[in-house]
Image: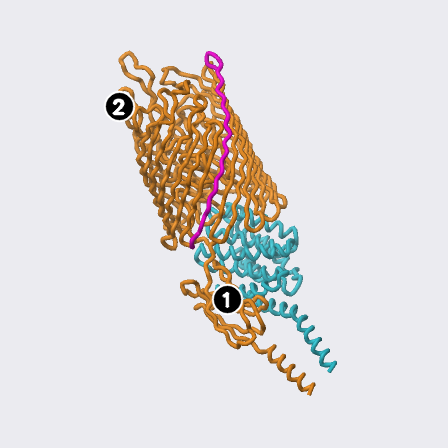
Chain colours: A orange, B cyan
Amino acid sequence: MKTFFFLVSLQLIISCTFAQVKFTGRVTDQKKMPLSGANVFFQNSYDGATADSIGNFRFKTSLKGMQTLKATFIGYKPLLKQMNLDSAKTITLDLILQESNDQIDEVVINAGSFEASDEKKAVILRMLDVATTPSAQGDIFGALCTLPGVEKVGEDGRVFVRGGESYETKAFLDGMNVSSPYLSKMPDLPTRGRFSPLLFSGTLFSTGAYSAEYGQALSGIVDMKTNSIETEDKSSVSIMTVGVMGSTTKCWKGASLSLIGDYVTTGLSNLINKQQVEWIKNPAGIDGTLMYRQKTGKTGMFKVFGTFNNSGSGLNYMNTQSGVFQNIILNSSDVYLNNTYNSMLGEKWMIKSGLAFNYDLQKFDLDKDQIATANKTVQAKVGFSRFLNEQTELKFGADWVHSSYEQKIRMGGNYRLPFANNQLSAFAEMEYKLSKKFATRIGARTENSSLLKGTTLVPRFSGAYKTGDHSQLSLAYGQFYQNPEDDYLKFAPQLKPEKANHAVMTWQYLTDLKTFRVEGYMKKYSDLVKYTLPLATDPLDYSNTGSGHAEGIDFFWRDKETFKQTDYWISYSWINARRNYKDFPVAAVPNFVSEHNFSMVYKRFFEPLRTFASVTYSFASSRPYHDPNLQGFMNSRTQPYNDISLSLTYLMEILGKQSVLHLMVNNLAGFDNIYGYNFSNSPNAAGHYESTPIKSPYVRQIILLLSIQL
Amino acid sequence: MKALFIILVLGTLSFSGSSDEAYQKAMSQSIEQLYQAKSIAEYVEVANQFERISNIEKTEWLPLYYASFAYIMISFQEPENAKKDSYLDQAQKYLDQAMIIETNESELYLLQGFLYPSRINIDPMNRGMAYIGKMNGSLDKALELNADNPRVYYLRATMTFHTPEAYGGGAAKALPLYKMADEKFRNFKPKTELSPNWGKEINETELKKLLETQK
């Protein structure tokens, strides 16, 4: 009996062991579309199956008891299901997977911003596009000038965004302030950015309504992201008609060090390219950059970026205002050091922190007079972000900037104009993804300045809604404060910050190969600095009573698909802007605003010739200027601006080394662009105010570069 | 009675012992299937098998290695760029997991060196330089860990062959590399039956093709 009982139970055990449960079913998304290729399996065995072309699956398992079924598919959240396998023989299941939010086709908050990135997928520009835009001559800010929303201001070279002055667009490096992003500037001549685009893997350029993380910018921000860890030792040397350059990179496990140095001298170039100005000392300078990257732990990254620049130039400058020629000698030194540390803290927290230091000294010698301006900035910043759940991310942070300014003037006596400021800021922002189609971001920023003795608090908002597989509509609104320029604060520290409100609406269609974007915006300025006389020294001459507005529409089209090995983009901006600020007697269009700006960049690789060719055409409609010989204010207009620039890059080998020969020609057609006029302060004997046109320093500029990878 | 009990116990023991056998069997079948796969569906099928195996064998890097390899192969067949990238993201995910399990494996660095250039074709003008640098870094590391890994030589040869002469590539430079790879493949013995052992045939085919065009 005992044996019999035992045998029966053994039988039972055996039959149970081999009794398999059959599974059938279908895997679909929330819209009931089959997910062909989904993986359906039990977590405790190899048993499972792949969904077929109509989403059906079928498999058997010998598992028993409570088990966990798992279904996975790329771009979808894994599905886990507990089930008891003891009683059933056949189980039919309908599995519905939910899309995960980290997919590339999800909605992205981007109203007002253009992103160039080598890391992210859905971006409008890559850093190489920036480096190879001919009219930019290798300058990041120059390349941004081919994007909509930026005015062409030939005699300045800096970025003027949507009816705002150049100082209203702030530069950041890995999220930290760069207080002097441009090289020092001679009067009426263009400057360029300090940094080579090759140092960066991405740039976020926002022409309005940006995140609460950024402050102290009324019009725009440019946040440059430095390269990550290098993975390969490499060195290169370049010889240019304007100097020499060398770089070397060394890698270790989890770390890399790059050193870049150059010596720029324009003596030869100014001989080759006919100059329309008289140099008494050709511009020359020396630059050095160090980049060190170190991985710390699993997710941490420590970056050091240090750079110095020393440059000088001398000009025999026709000072039309006073009617005399002046010898201007400009010498400048700049040191910038930036350390950042980013890491995950556990699973859900992330920290971004940084320390930055900037010292900038500019010395102008005007005949016997001298003006020396020194600017020192120290910044400490820390920010945290936390994922509250898959849809919600909370970001907050604080930022301390100490800046001290000192101008020493020797002009028939010695004068000192110093001031210092401690700026404390904090921001918080929450991004909420309601679905794959709809996202919002709400934030606020507060700033306190010890110099201006006041605290500001501003809201920022943006939202985006996907209108199709590749298209989306975005809206953004924000308020922005910026301290008045140093040139006013040095006389009048009682001023308040200037203020701007932005509202932006964007519709964008973006695929890998084509982009179309249209953006409308409205901008309102208040509390702008106003004075009765330029360079007035009486603090009471300055007030925050200025105002202004700008409205416009920007279009952008890029196509890498239609023509073989060809990539082109077209930007067009229309703007209507008026300001009553500075010493304006009435509201008027400022002289840097042109109503229509158009640019087209065309790039093509000619494979049989091993040559990469790029052409830029830029057009800007006429700009206003004030002619004291005529009635009224801002009563005259310049001719429109035209420029065609070309670059050719030829790939070759020299002694078995990869080499590149690069030719850049600016203003190929030799357009005689006039940006405006300088008028004398007092009329001549005939009662006429004499004038001289403001022009480019050269008619045409040709630069040749040979770079060899060692 | 006692004897039965012992048999039962032994049975259970051998059953638990057979888990390793099951792994060997499941892996060798899947690897076979992987090398035979042609269409996206076939690759997905086999990648899913490896995913299921890796889900249980949490200390083995090989299932993740093969799952990653399968997704790289899928990316070559996929015509749409955005999807290519998401397949390569998936491949990278498996590879990252494998690298956590086994930090010093030449084959994993080799696979990383195979994955990086796969991203180039999606946008050669912009990605070329960056990913070639990354690839070289990974291949150097793979070689450092195993100077005789034939797949490193094969990948170097292939990359050189497909690089324009202007960039220091071309058939003439690739030929000695293919020959070198061929020699390495001839002397190569995989560590275990399940260890990576692909590339020999394709290297031979490429070498033969190249030698014929040279005649």
Q: Relative to A16, does residue B98 appear above or below in the rendering?
A: above
Q: Which image quarter: residue A496? A: top left
Q: Is residue A422 shown in magenta? A: yes
Would residue A629 be found to the left or right of residue A389 on screen?
Answer: left
Seen from the viewer's position, the closer of residues A134 and A271 is A134
The amino acid on which the numbered mark 2 sits, given as a three-letter code, is: Gly
Q: Which mark is residue A632?
A: 2
Q: Is residue B35 visible?
A: no
Label 1: few (<14), some (14–19) or many (≥20) C-alpha neighbours in 10 Å: some
Q: Residue at x 38, y 18 (%)?
A: A319
Seen from the viewer's position, the closer of residues A526 and B76 is A526
Label the magenta part by its dominant secondary structure: strand
Residues indicated by labels 1 and 2 sit on the same polypeptide chain: no
Q: Which mark is residue B42?
A: 1
Farthest residue to the bottom: give it. A1
**Mark 2 chain:** A
Please state the extent of the stretch shown in magenta in the rendering.
Answer: A410-435
How far from the left and from the top, in percent, is residue B2?
Answer: 74, 81
